[in-house]
Image (tube, rainbow, N blue to C red):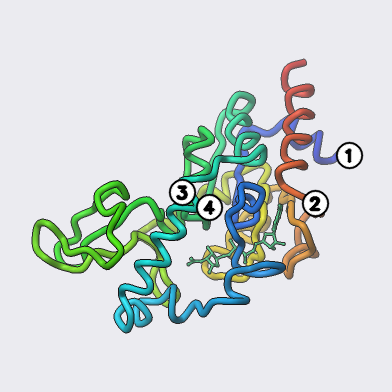
């Protein structure tokens, strides 16, 4: 693929790169996306599986679903897209990753500055006393466990529909977006707010915003560039160009 000169120029002079990612970056690792072809929300109901009310109505069903997804994530590995993002750190002063994903794959690929807007599936917390637990502690629980400290219900540390993002995280994300010189928007349908405001906030602040997605999205037209294809193929190509222009 021939990368446009304008992108190469921006990457040559940039100091701060931001990657804003969604489920599509993990698709090539075998983690299902939520929307689009094969998307989870085409066959399952988010109000039952990803809302506080759904959890209170049927806690064991929701727990079982998260235990299943944890197994999927544990049995997979980061793909070339995640690894390329981690490797960008060799070539720029600051690389920020802001992800909507809960799958921990950016960390496992080696990225360091990660903001997880929607939590992390590999953590749990007690709804009574707020104590956090790693995923190992209840690995084999088929039903919602009780907190060993206070007996409260344990839930996954993820943001469900209708819930607020973790305190202050959105403000930090917007700041990082506004400071970025180049912002890559990777594998997200950009329809879940407030996360979906991030690319627009970056663009308004003068960042050069580049989308990488299998298909066009609602925001494609308002960004600087839009590449259609697999992030696991396009990101390594951009990284190869970065190596060339930043090492010479
Ligand atoms: P979606 O499932 O809504 O969108 C995934 C996007 O990735 C789609 O636009 C696909 O076209 C694209 N895609 C799929 N495979 C790809 C590939 N190999 N390379 C590049 N792009 C690819 O996922 P998100 O936008 O992350 O929320 O969804 C946002 C939020 O909705 C999630 O964080 C989750 C969900 O409900 C919570 O859990 C709160």
State if disc 4 and disc 1 touch (CB < 8 Å). no
Instruction: Tell me if I can see residue 133 in this picture.
Output: yes
Q: Mark 3 sits on what residue?
A: 115
Q: Earlier in the sequence, mark 1 or mark 2?
A: 1
SS category of the residue bearing label 1? loop
Residue visible at 12% across and 57% down?
148
Q: Earlier in the sequence, mark 2 or mark 3?
A: 3
Please state the horizontal and vertical placement of residue 21, each as a whole percent of the image. 60, 52
Quadrant in the rendering for residue 125:
bottom left
SS category of the residue bearing label 2? loop
| Residue situated furthest top in the rendering | 248
Q: Nearer the viewer, mark 1 or mark 3?
A: 1
Please state the horizontal and vertical placement of residue 193, each as a whole percent of the image. 54, 70
Q: Nearer the viewer, mark 2 or mark 4?
A: 2
Q: Mark 2 sits on what residue?
A: 229
Please state the horizontal and vertical placement of residue 153, each as a whole percent of the image. 20, 68
Label 2 lies in ligand 1 vicinity (Cβ under 8 Å):
yes
**Mark 1 and mark 4: span between their CA atoms?**
26 Å
State if disc 3 and disc 4 touch (CB < 8 Å). yes
Q: Nearer the viewer, mark 2 or mark 3?
A: 2
**Mark 2 and mark 3: span between their CA atoms?**
25 Å
């Amino acid at each position: 693929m021939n990368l446009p000169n304008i992108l190469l120029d921006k990457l040559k002079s940039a100091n701060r790169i931001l990657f804003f990612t969604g489920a599509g970056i993990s698709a090539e690792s075998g983690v299902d996306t939520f929307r689009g072809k094969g998307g989870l929300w085409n066959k399952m109901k988010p109000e039952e599986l990803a809302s506080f009310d759904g959890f209170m109505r049927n806690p064991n069903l929701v727990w079982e679903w998260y235990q299943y997804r944890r197994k999927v994530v544990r049995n997979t590995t980061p793909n070339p897209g995640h690894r390329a993002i981690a490797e960008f750190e060799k070539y720029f002063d600051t690389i920020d990753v802001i992800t909507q994903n809960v799958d921990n794959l950016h960390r496992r690929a080696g990225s360091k500055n990660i903001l997880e807007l929607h939590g992390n599936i590999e953590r749990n917390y007690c709804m009574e006393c707020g104590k956090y637990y790693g995923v190992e502690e209840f690995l084999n629980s088929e039903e919602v466990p009780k907190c060993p400290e206070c007996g409260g219900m344990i839930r996954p540390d993820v943001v469900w529909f209708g819930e607020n993002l973790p305190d202050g995280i959105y403000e930090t994300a917007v700041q990082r977006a506004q400071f970025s010189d180049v912002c890559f928007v990777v594998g997200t349908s950009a329809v879940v707010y407030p996360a979906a405001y991030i690319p627009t906030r970056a663009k308004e602040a003068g960042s050069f915003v580049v989308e990488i997605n299998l298909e066009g999205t609602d925001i494609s037209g308002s960004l600087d560039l839009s590449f259609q294809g697999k992030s696991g193929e396009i990101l390594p190509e951009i990284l190869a160009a970065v190596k060339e222009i930043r090492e010479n």
